Image (cartoon, coloured by chain):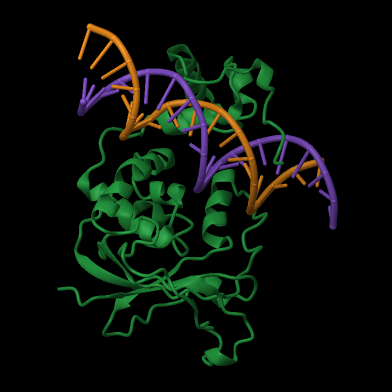
Chain colours: A green, B orange, C purple
Amino acid sequence: MGRSPCCEKAHTNKGAWTKDEDQRLIDYIRLHGEGCWRTLPKAAGLLRCGKSCRLRWINYLRPDLKRGNFTQDEDELIIKLHSLLGNKWSVIAGRLPGRTDNEIKNYWNTHIKRKLISRGIDPQTHRPLNEPTAVTTRLPYRNPNNSSSSSSSVPTAELPIPKPATINVQSSEVDEEGSGTTTEMEPPLPTAEAHVKTELNLELSIGLQPFQAEATRGSPGSSAESRLRDRRSFGSVCLCWQLGSENSGGGGECCRNCESSYGWVFGIRASALGSS
DNA sequence: AAAGGGCTCAACCGCTGTCGC
DNA sequence: CGCGACAGCGGTTGAGCCCTT
């Protein structure tokens, strides 16, 4: 099953990288930039598969990597993000500058899992270990275009309703990355730099909703990176965050995805717990 | 000092989604 | 529309390090 190997295995090195290989890769990327990983090994004079080069660069050689021990803040942030996103290591890594998905994944498996278990928390569900297994419940579908949810013809998802996750975010500071073209779609997840100011009760309301699957496809000038961003934000799952105070009924705005009419998205509602 | 068991983390593997032809 | 190429993701593996006996 699966795809054929991405490169000629017989003529590629495997295992640990040598200093010489590292230097060749660094030199090449400094000169030509990232991308085109398939042809890179040959062009850089490396007997490695492109995937291996990409991984080595992303996880180890990139100049902006932080490395070193995780701080207590990073620990807590990873736990919170995992409770919201699950094993979406690349998304979690995107919120921790200088950390890679692989690093976070390893750290989760070796440290945080144990830490949570010692606290009596199930690392997968983020619920108390002695709590009975999650009950499967039908979630109501909230159609923004149709206030009568019961009359919706859209099927509801059968998903376990997670206990509302509590997350600390700084409401006044927005992630710099969110200022680009994806501002509207990127959920305002907390960053490592964000200071704790507001305790939010994230009420996850997950419902199947339509979305425009072809929204960004083939848009002129879309780079591979922007396509990836598009995929994350416009893809099969839309994390539509509605942040507001409990007093105001958490009445935020729906994102464009939730208002469009093809495909399915998930919406996440969040309300503040009366910050002071 | 040596053995061996546990732990860590870099690297690999299999798979998916998207794009271009 | 189908297919192959490609980038990227998450799960798994295993070499090497560390700690305990």
Q: How many numbered discs sit on the rendered protein?
A: 0
Q: Position of residue A263 (x, y in %)?
A: 63, 70
Q: Residue at x 35, y 34 (%)?
A: A65
- Residue A239 in view, yes or no: yes
Q: Position of residue A144 (x, y in %)?
A: 52, 83
* Picture layout, residue A178 above or below residue A248: above
Residue A33 in view of the camera? no
The residue shown at (43%, 57%) is A86
Which is more toward the observer, A77 or A28?
A: A77
Name the quadrant of the C terminus of chain A: bottom left
Residue drawn 29% across the image and 53% down it? A117
**Direction left: furthest residue:** A276
Residue at 57% across, 33% down: A35
Tell which of A187 and A158 is nearer to you.
A158
Q: Within the image, what quadrant is residue A32 found in?
A: top right
The quarter of the rendered structure image containing the N terminus of chain A is top right
Residue A223 drawn at (x, y percent): 59, 45
The quarter holding residue A143 reads bottom right
Q: Is residue A254 left or right of residue A107?
A: right
- The residue nearer to you, when weighing A28 against C2, is C2
Q: Is residue A80 left or right of residue A58?
A: left
A165 vs A56: above or below? below
Spot occupied by residue B11 in the image (x, y as percentages of width and height):
50, 26
Against A73, residue A52 (above or below) is above
